[in-house]
Amino acid sequence: MATGSKQSSGARPKAIVSLPSAPRTRSRLVRREPEPPRPASRRLPLPSSVNRGRILWPYVISIGLYHLLALSALVPWLFSWSGVVLAVAGLYVFGTLGINLCYHRLLTHRGFNCPPWLEHALALLGICCLQDTPARWVAVHRLHHQHSDEEPDPHSPLVTFLWGHIGWLMVENRQVNSVLTYDRYARDVLKDPFYFAFERNLLWVWVNLVQWLAFFLPGLAIGWSQGTSADGVRFGLSLLVWGVFVRTVAVWHITWSVNSATHIWGYRNYETGENSRNNWLVALISNGEGWHNNHHADQRSAAHGHRWWEFDVTYLTICLLEKLGLASDVVRPNQKLTET
């Protein structure tokens, strides 16, 4: 795969702005008053590297199966308030810490540093969300930033909303699967043997099997100790369904909404050369990822909220880690942007 194709004289500059050695931003950004929500005004073709005739059945089956298992939470026999609490808490523990904080702001954009043991622990939380290996997630996201809302963008909703939300996962994209893409966009991640190991075998499968057991077995033991073996099985399955399947599907759609909704609906603080938006609803359910126009304007910043009302729980968590001595080199918002 070659991502360094020639560009027209009027195209915006191309650079991998998310790598540690890259400048914070070189694009001409203008602060302005928020726009009212409006739909995208243009449409894109599918990336030329997409083969619509080749369905990625492992993804289709896994995503479909998890949705079906999550729907089993509607069965009264599988309901428990303990399971609901685990699902809600898991949105933060796995979604915010694993995906937002680790996969996105740490590994992809290097918005801060932390000790390797903590970084790897956070990455395991991200792996439990079944959003691909850390290196693949990073490569896809950096590719998105370099070609945002242009034809090579792997998941622009300017193709269709459904494509940007979930469709791009279902069919082969030769560019995304290319070894050259990994080498160009995730080389720094793959230098760590911990992450490289997840590319060479099925470690992610074992991580998720352990996750299932970690939810089911305590529930089985607690339920059995307070009743019969059937009570134990019921309570264990309740914790598994709510704590893993419901939570995972919810985190999926939250992450996918950042890819889709925040490139269609919302307001803009900055002119960024693509269609990124700040969407308050997505920001609320994603703990700050929905301030997406701010993020595209200042990609390395660990903070996505730039105005006082743009609440960013993920950034507050990074600040807490910094206070505890567990995070360093936190990249703050570019003052030249926020003060204009």
Image (cartoon, rainbow, N blue to C red):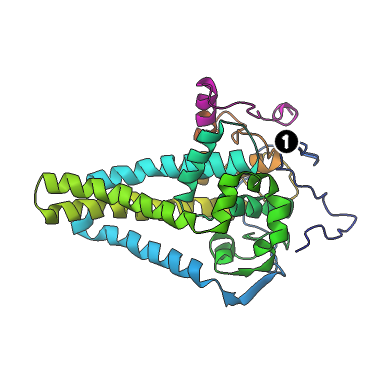
Q: Quadrant of the C terminus?
A: top right
Q: Is residue 185 left or right of residue 60?
A: right
Picture quadrant of residue 34: top right
Badge 1 marks a residue whose secondary structure is loop
Instruction: Name the residue furthest bottom.
Output: 53
Q: Is residue 225 left or right of residue 324?
A: left
Residue 97 within the magenta-colored segment of the rendering: no
Instruction: Name the residue furthest left.
Output: 227
Residue 320 within the magenta-colored segment of the rendering: yes
Q: Quadrant of the N terminus?
A: bottom right
Q: Which residues are magenta?
A: 317-340
One can see residue 201 in this view:
yes
Q: Position of residue 140 (x, y in %)?
A: 64, 55
At horizontal 74% and vertical 43% (from top left) the residue drawn is 17
List the residue tagged with mark 1: 31
Picture quadrant of residue 119: top right
Where 143 falls versus 108 (above or below)? below
At horizontal 10% and vertical 44% (from top left) the residue drawn is 226
Picture quadrant of residue 144: bottom right
Q: Is residue 15 left or right of residue 59?
A: right
Residue 294 or residue 67, whichever sits in front:
67
Name the amino acid type tagged 1.
Arg
At horizontal 77% and vertical 59% (from top left) the residue drawn is 3
Q: Position of residue 105 (x, y in %)?
A: 60, 39
One can see residue 148 in this view:
no
Q: Position of residue 263 (x, y in %)?
A: 62, 53
Q: Position of residue 196 (x, y in %)?
A: 60, 50
At horizontal 42% and vertical 67% (from top left) the residue drawn is 64
Where 182 falls versus 163 (above or below)? above
